[in-house]
Image (cartoon, helix red, strand yellow):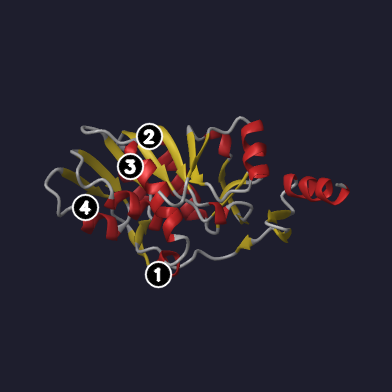
Amino acid sequence: MTIRRDLTKLEEQGMIRRTHGGATIGQFINTQPHSEESKSRCPEEKHAIASYAASLVSDGQSILLDAGTTCMEIARQLVDRRIRVVTTDLAQALFLCRYRNIEVHIAGGQVDERTQSSLGGNVQHFLDDLNVELAFIGCTSWDLQRGVTTPTEDRAELKRKMFERAGTRILVADSEKYGRYSFHRIMGLERFDLVVTDSHLPEHCCESLKNAEINLHLVPFNL
């Protein structure tokens, strides 16, 4: 019991991440994962998260999709909606523009090779002139103590701008990314209207998040 209490305390301080039967040191993410690498990680969990996220979108809405594989999965599940989609992700834009019922807007700027999406000041200026009802924002790492983080300043600034332009802001992140952190803090979890993750998130992590009044929705990964 003493060991369990100590592990819980260390996790609350962000120093470790509890796993089944043990713990690991909190992982620092130094570089942005390549999109090809991300595709193979947690595909079932991302599909489940995306299914729930897509269910929150209604015909006639304007939404913003962040770059990344989770939001790409959301895009695949929105093809039957009559909506307007704003994205920075090239793959999402190319996929969605095939559907006449979806109006696609892509924010132009310098294309980042690792995420195959646009970044930089021009993207932020583009978003300044838009308002959307929902924004689905992804991340490489999230944690109760450290918040949502990213390896680079330009991504942190862009995600803050996406957050600013939306009426409802939803974080979509699989449980594997929880307890990890990176150099640039985007914002605290408490600022999101909803955090959607999969049911692999350990129970004690769920309890900590709920005690901090984070609006958390757990999706079974085997929907």
Q: Which residue is mark 2?
A: 166
Q: Which residue is mark 1?
A: 36
- Most distant residue in the left direction: 100
In the rendered view, does 2 fall on the left or right side of 199? right
Residue at image position (21%, 52%) is 96
| Front residue (pair 201, 26) | 201
Which x, y percent locates residue 199?
53, 47
Residue at image position (73%, 55%) is 16
Which x, y percent locates residue 19?
68, 56
Q: CA distance from mark 4 to mark 2?
A: 20 Å
Q: Which residue is mark 3?
A: 54
What residue type is disc 2 on? Ala
Using the image, determine if residue 85 lies above or below residue 91. Answer: above
- Most distant residue in the right direction: 2
Q: CA distance from mark 3 to mark 1?
A: 23 Å
Residue at image position (42%, 60%) is 43
| Front residue (pair 166, 48) | 48
Tell which tag, 2 or 1, sits nearer the viewer.
1
Upstream in the sequence, badge 3 or badge 1?
Answer: 1
Marks 4,3: beta carbons within 8 A: no
Upstream in the sequence, badge 4 or badge 1?
Answer: 1
Residue 120 seen anywhere in this rendered image of the structure = no
What crowding class fits label 3: few (fewer than 14 Cα within 10 Å), some (14-19), or many (20 or more)?
Answer: some
Q: CA distance from mark 2 to mark 1?
A: 28 Å
Marks 4,2: beta carbons within 8 A: no
What residue type is disc 4 on? Leu
Tell which tag, 4 or 3, sits nearer the viewer.
3
